[in-house]
Image (cartoon, rainbow, N blue to C red):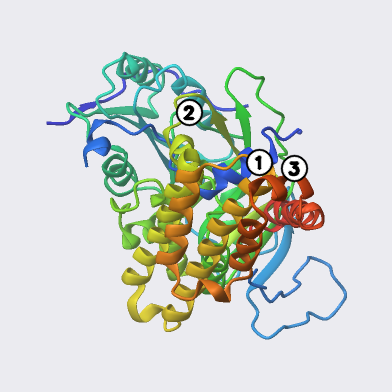
């Protein structure tokens, strides 16, 4: 039996930069962002994109590449281009875009007020919040009820027994939303000022966009919340299929859950989260949604805060045994998506081979790095190589395989002493800096 706690009448309160986290932390958290703490039920249980320049006021003729997959425009107060066709009719009583925000909570009660306040303070939008307490049993539900009693836009659902985060996610995005747009965010995250209106502006500009995301700021719990970039956003729109192919080429997630907003209509068509993808269900969901339309990215701004703290179960899963579990879950998300897409992706075989080779190469590279750093973990290395063999049949076709074989011939002491990666390590750092900048500026 589910208990629905409706808020008591109360005052309606409205809302009136430094980027946190190390690059390594940002990369780790981007790979998988299912950050809601795992409850008892869960314990049981590069690819180039062609570009079309569409900057407002650009006098140059637009140059079309092989296949136009990306468009850009600058949006801000007073500069939003007229939407194609009639303006959308929003469902809000005030004629504003409406957002339904689901906040699953499992023993995150101390962090819940920050998350809720960040949503209620959003300007120029109408919001509803449903907090779903997954049988926390630690007082988190009490905090949720207090928040609901203080603002009529907040309601609470309490699970009498723990259902696990996947079922709770699905409940949040399927059973609850009736507004224009849907957002699922963990109780330990928060939105930046103006995040929802920025997303609504892109949705309004491009009716073909079904999913909008942006950058997230990562900061450690206990540290001051960093200043967010909230100025005019640059709109970048990718063809959904080409955005999806990029994800297979990289083999990793590029969007943190609190920074992703979907059209409610499309979310209902796509369905709920997949229980098979325990720690990468968000990754699979974003790819699935991209099958239904274009994907928008809000550049030059920050959309959400992601909090790093000791209760984060996904981070532990990603780092254990050299991260082999994370590689397996990322591959699983991609294969699950291919099974669901069926005829919607005629190049499914090619995509499958692409992501398998990418993740196998990542696994072998991690083993090579352990030689170079003089910090080998024999068991972790064995599991990483086993994963690579399972992912691809022809390991010898991967450059990373031959690089690993060289280190094995040299031995761990010589490899560490002579550092055969002195040049390649510097190259890797340069490539990683470029990738981080690309993620920040283009979202892919």
Residue 35 picture location, percent across and down: 44, 37
* Callout 1 crowding tier (Cα within 10 Å): few <14, some 14–19, many ≥20: some
Residue picked out by circle 3: 231
Residue 293 picture location, percent across and down: 48, 69
* Callout 3 crowding tier (Cα within 10 Å): few <14, some 14–19, many ≥20: some
| Residue 289 located left or right of residue 22 | left
Residue lying at 61% horizontally and 63% vertically, measured from the top left: 405
Let me know if residue 216 appears in the view: no
Residue picked out by circle 2: 188
Question: In terms of secondary structure, where does tag 2 sit?
Answer: loop
Q: Quadrant of the N terminus?
A: top left
The nearer-to-camera label among 1 and 3 is: 1
Residue lying at 35% horizontally and 81% vertically, measured from the top left: 343
| Residue 234 located left or right of residue 112 | right
170 and 358: which is toward the camera:
358
Q: Tell me which label, 1 or 3, sits earlier in the chain.
A: 3
Question: In terms of secondary structure, where does tag 3 sit?
Answer: loop
Marks 2 and 3, how far apart at CA: 24 Å
Q: Tell me which label, 2 or 1, sits earlier in the chain.
A: 2
The nearer-to-camera label among 2 and 1 is: 1
Residue 129 picture location, percent across and down: 39, 33
- Image quadrant where residue 62 sits: bottom right
Residue picked out by circle 1: 374
Marks 2 and 1, how far apart at CA: 36 Å
């Amino acid at each position: 039996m589910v208990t629905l706690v409706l808020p008591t009448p109360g005052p309606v309160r409205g809302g009136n930069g430094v980027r946190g986290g190390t690059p390594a932390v940002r990369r780790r958290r981007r790979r998988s962002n299912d950050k809601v703490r795992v409850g008892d039920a869960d314990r049981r249980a590069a690819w180039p994109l062609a570009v079309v320049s569409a900057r407002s006021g650009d006098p140059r003729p637009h140059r079309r590449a092989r296949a136009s997959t990306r468009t850009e425009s600058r949006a801000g107060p007073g500069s939003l281009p007229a939407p194609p066709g009639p303006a959308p009719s929003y469902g809000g009583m005030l004629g504003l875009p409406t957002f339904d925000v689901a906040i699953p909570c499992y023993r995150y009660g101390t962090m819940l007020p920050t998350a809720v306040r960040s949503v209620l303070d959003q300007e120029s939008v109408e919001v509803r919040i449903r907090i779903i307490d997954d049988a926390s049993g630690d007082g988190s539900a009490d905090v949720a009820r207090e928040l609901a009693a203080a603002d009529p836009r907040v309601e609470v659902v309490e699970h009498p027994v723990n259902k696990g985060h996947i079922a709770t996610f699905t409940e949040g995005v399927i059973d609850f939303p009736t507004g224009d747009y849907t957002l699922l965010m963990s109780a330990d995250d928060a939105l930046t000022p103006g995040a929802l209106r920025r997303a609504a502006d892109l949705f309004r500009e491009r009716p073909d966009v079904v999913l909008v995301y942006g950058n997230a700021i990562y900061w450690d719990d206990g540290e001051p919340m960093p200043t967010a970039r909230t100025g005019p956003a640059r709109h970048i729109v990718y063809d959904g299929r080409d955005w999806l192919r990029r994800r297979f080429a990289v083999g990793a997630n590029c969007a943190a859950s609190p920074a992703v907003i979907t059209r409610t209509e499309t979310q209902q068509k796509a369905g709920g989260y997949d229980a098979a993808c325990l720690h990468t269900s968000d990754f699979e969901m974003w790819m699935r949604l991209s099958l239904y339309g274009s994907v928008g990215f809000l550049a030059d701004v920050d959309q959400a805060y992601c909090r790093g703290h000791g209760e984060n179960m996904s981070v532990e899963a990603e780092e254990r045994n050299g991260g082999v579990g994370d590689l397996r879950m990322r591959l699983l998300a991609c294969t699950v998506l291919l099974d669901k897409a069926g005829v919607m992706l005629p190049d499914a075989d090619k995509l499958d081979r692409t992501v398998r080779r990418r993740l196998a190469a990542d696994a072998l590279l991690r083993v090579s790095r352990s030689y170079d750093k003089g910090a080998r973990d024999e068991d972790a290395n064995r599991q990483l190589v086993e994963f690579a063999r399972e992912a691809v049949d022809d390991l010898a076709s991967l450059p990373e395989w031959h690089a690993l074989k060289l280190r094995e011939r040299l031995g761990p002491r010589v490899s560490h002493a002579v550092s055969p990666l002195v040049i390649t390590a510097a190259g890797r750092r340069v490539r990683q800096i470029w990738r981080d900048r690309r993620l920040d500026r283009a979202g892919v």
